[in-house]
Image (tube, rainbow, N blue to C red):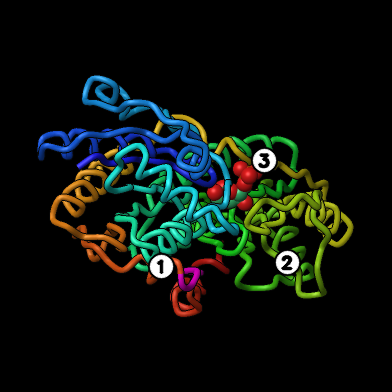
Amino acid sequence: MKIGILTGGGDCPGLNGVIRAAVIEGTELGHEFIGFRDGWRGPLENDWEPLNVERVAEILPLGGTILGTSRTNAGQPGRIEKIKENLTELGVDALIPIGGEDTLGAATALSQAGVRCVGVPKTIDNDLSGTDVTFGFTTAVEIATDSIDRLRTTSASHHRAIVAEVMGRHAGWIALHTGIATSAVATLIPEVPFDLGEIAERVKRRVDARRDAIVVVAEGALPREGTVSSDSNEVDEFGHVQVGGIASYVAAELEKLAGIETRATVLGHVQRGGAPSAYDRVLTTRLGAAAARALDAGESGVMVALCGGAINTIPLAEATGTLRTVPPELLEQLGTVLKSM
Ligand code: F6P
């Protein structure tokens, strides 16, 4: 089989690990590979490069993606047909699309249109259903934790509060894990509208007692009182508004309410850059190899996923149907600890 690989959506540490393992495993099984450049733009515009074991040999610790990425939406009118046409012309028999809900949503449509696809779930946000965790997430949490440990020392020196904004448009997984790991005084996530008055009291108590106070806020979190406008009105091909700016709003409000000098820091794309953690290197190696094996075994319309420690295949539609947000039961379990920090 000739297999095409592509990486779509926001990049994420670990993409190269998936590419590497799929090529090594698939080549061993007798298949040939090409890499499409910049997500769905590659097969749409016939932009590709050859992939072989030599090309991928050294890429496991590399951040980003050697193939490039984009938010090109293959689901727009006429594009599925165009991609099918181009794949036939190139003699590509199957695809391994690596991406989040948008990239895998397009993969679902393509596989329904008869193209063999085995997807690999990716997003630092950890909000895809059907898999215990998405690769890139643990690396992002490590980076955010390291950054906030640094913010804490300067917060303490100045008797200031610092509001640290992390990624997470619809799901608060990065904020929650980072908030726990850094014993933040408050962790604000999109799933639970927050009460600024209550947080201000906690910040004041914390600075009085220990001099520092860190508030972790997910970029998509909103206050109980209503909505805050985004810094930007830009919308991508999937209709996602670029969020951001909540940390400045929260910092300004807390400063007024708590009477404590407060600064805002947006961690932004630092969370997505650089080398993947050891955990993500192992996970992506398992996922990439499993994707090649699944295609070799004749599977299609599925994605490989971590399910209770094992790598399984599940229907693509299962992953893209609903977003996996932080469940209330988990917050309840953590309630006392979160509030006592
Ligand atoms: O890929 C997911 C993500 O990192 C989100 O957490 C974030 O909101 C978004 O991508 C940022 O997108 P962009 O890279 O287009 O600014």
244 relative to 46, above or below: below
Q: Amino acid at mark 3?
A: Ala
Q: Which SS class for mark 2?
A: loop
Q: Considering the whole magenta stretch, tell me its main secondary structure.
A: loop
Instruction: Give the Cα distance between marks 1 and 3.
Output: 39 Å
Q: Is residue 61 left or right of residue 11?
A: left
Residue located farthest toward the right when viewing the structure as drawn = 256
Q: Quadrant of the C terminus?
A: bottom right
Q: Is residue 322 left or right of residue 53?
A: right
Q: Residue at x 67, y 57 (%)?
A: 240
Q: Which residues are magenta?
A: 321-325
30 relative to 185, above or below: above
Residue 231, percent from left and from top: 81, 49
Q: Quadrant of the N terminus?
A: top left
- Quadrant assignment, res 23: top left
Q: Which mark is residue 222?
A: 2
- Say whether disc 2 or disc 3 marks the residue closer to the N-terminus: 3
